[in-house]
Image: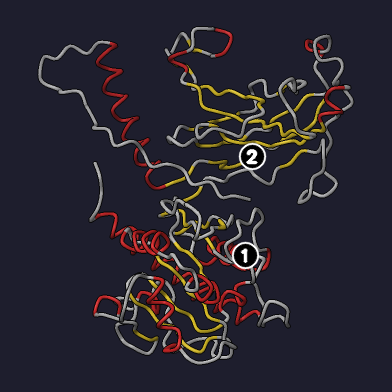
Amino acid sequence: MVNQFYSTPPIDPLNRLSVRDGLEVNAERWELAHRYHRHRQNIHYQSLNQPGIVCGLGIRITETPQKWSRKFSKQGFCLEIQPGIAIDIEGNPIIVDKDIDRVFPFKKPDISDIGDEEITVYLVVSYVDSRRLTDEEYWKKDKERGEEREWLRFDQQLEPPKETQIELCRIKLLVEDVELDKFKLKIPQDIFNPQSNEIDLRYRQQAKARPQALINIATTATNSENSFFQIFSSPCPITNNNLSCLMQSLDALYPCLQGNTEVANIDLEETFNLENIDFIHIPFEKIQHLCKSSDLSSIKESLNRYRRKGGVILVEADSKLEGNFHNMIPDITKLFSLDKLDENLSFQEWGCDDLGGENLLKNKPFLFTALPLTKLILNIYYAAGIIVVHGNLSNAWGGKYESDEENLPRNDIRIAHELGINMLYFAYRRRKMMSLLDSDI
């Protein structure tokens, strides 16, 4: 599942009512004063939290009420939303209490423009500003006390939820069944693996603290060792699975960062956009292949532009690779447009006190006092946005000594994830700080 990272609040000024003695308080000024406080609350919530469900809002299949039986007689069922609370992206509370009509008629979806064999239907809820409602049927008002409740809206749609909507469930339907009116909603037999027509609750977002950033990573690893200039339409399953395991570990080990578990595959010879990529994994074998190319100018320019913008590149050389780090220097420097290692790209090894600048690779967020996993990692080097690992670190993220050998002990997997998270945190900090020096308003 792809993690969703919500946008920060718009950078708009706050305007509040200028109060002075003798000021007449009318409806317009009262509304202006309260709009200011709502705006402050929205900015505060959106800056520190993410939208989602706070509690409740379960889904129950129920029979169609008599008032709708004629219109929805073919389906013969409805969904009943259980009481609960959610908060949208602006911090608006969505309260579904037991006294409102919570039965939602599941309608036959429109598949006139659908070319797939299967469709996904989303049931969502969203906040409604009752001040903008004109239909008395949709909002309630206590005339004696001058109160009106804040309202909400349930929707059934074929598009994924918008930022202002909270997903309650999704249901996959076969287009053929929809065309023949044969579909019927069911409770899933396996809640973690729902099938067609079964209610899927796996993608419901919980309200929680907002992470500092969404980390996106990419790899140049491919399925072929011989045709390295080929464009691969499918990702390398072993490498991508290892990197995805690292990204998944962020939720539990360091939730201040959110990892996108969809690892992008890039071909360095083709035109590619690295604007949203924070961290690139390049096997050293790939660098060796590229260095045999007659024209590296465009690749060099793209990678160096990427580093100048704050991106971090992880070069990983298999521990079985003949020679040591110094044998790798010619190929690494050639790829990064350098004739020699000058003072701006002077690699420092793990034991150096200044590795990574203030030791971020060694102590943020996890402390390492010595080179870890020495059975897998021979050494680690760093210079100006390039991390070189002489070893099999990415295999350890997937729980293996090597891609096709025995599994690692759990403690070693945890250590590998913590080291990988230090690298991701370092990439986030480097990219963030570099952007502050090169920001366009």
Which residue sits furthest left? 21
Q: Quadrant of the C terminus?
A: top left
* Residue located at (61% from left, 34% from top): 160
Instruction: Tell me how many marks there are.
Output: 2
Q: Position of residue 140 (x, y in %)?
A: 53, 14
Q: Nearer the viewer, residue 30 or 206?
A: 206
The image quadrant that residue 71 belongs to is top right
Q: Position of residue 104 (x, y in %)?
A: 71, 23
* Residue located at (64% from left, 23% from top): 99
Q: Is residue 170 above or below residue 410?
A: above
Identify the amino acid type marked 2: Gly
* Alpha carbon separation for disc pair 1 and 2: 45 Å
Q: Earlier in the sequence, mark 1 or mark 2?
A: 2
Which mark, residue 331? none
Q: Is residue 431 above or below residue 4?
A: below
Which mark, residue 56? 2
Q: Nearer the viewer, residue 427 or 206?
A: 427
Residues at marks 1 and 2 touching, judged by CB atoms closer than 8 Å: no
Q: Position of residue 74 (x, y in %)?
A: 87, 17
Left or right of 29 on screen, residue 39: right
Secondary structure under badge 1? Answer: loop
Q: Which residue is mark 1?
A: 222
* Residue located at (42% from left, 62% from top): 299
The image quadrant that residue 46 belongs to is top left
Q: Is residue 270 above or below residue 153?
A: below
* Residue located at (43% from left, 68% from top): 313
Callout 2 crowding tier (Cα within 10 Å): few <14, some 14–19, many ≥20: few
Identify the amino acid type marked 1: Thr
Secondary structure under badge 2? Answer: strand
Q: Position of residue 372 (x, y in %)?
A: 50, 86
Callout 1 crowding tier (Cα within 10 Å): few <14, some 14–19, many ≥20: many
| Residue 105 seen in the current view | no
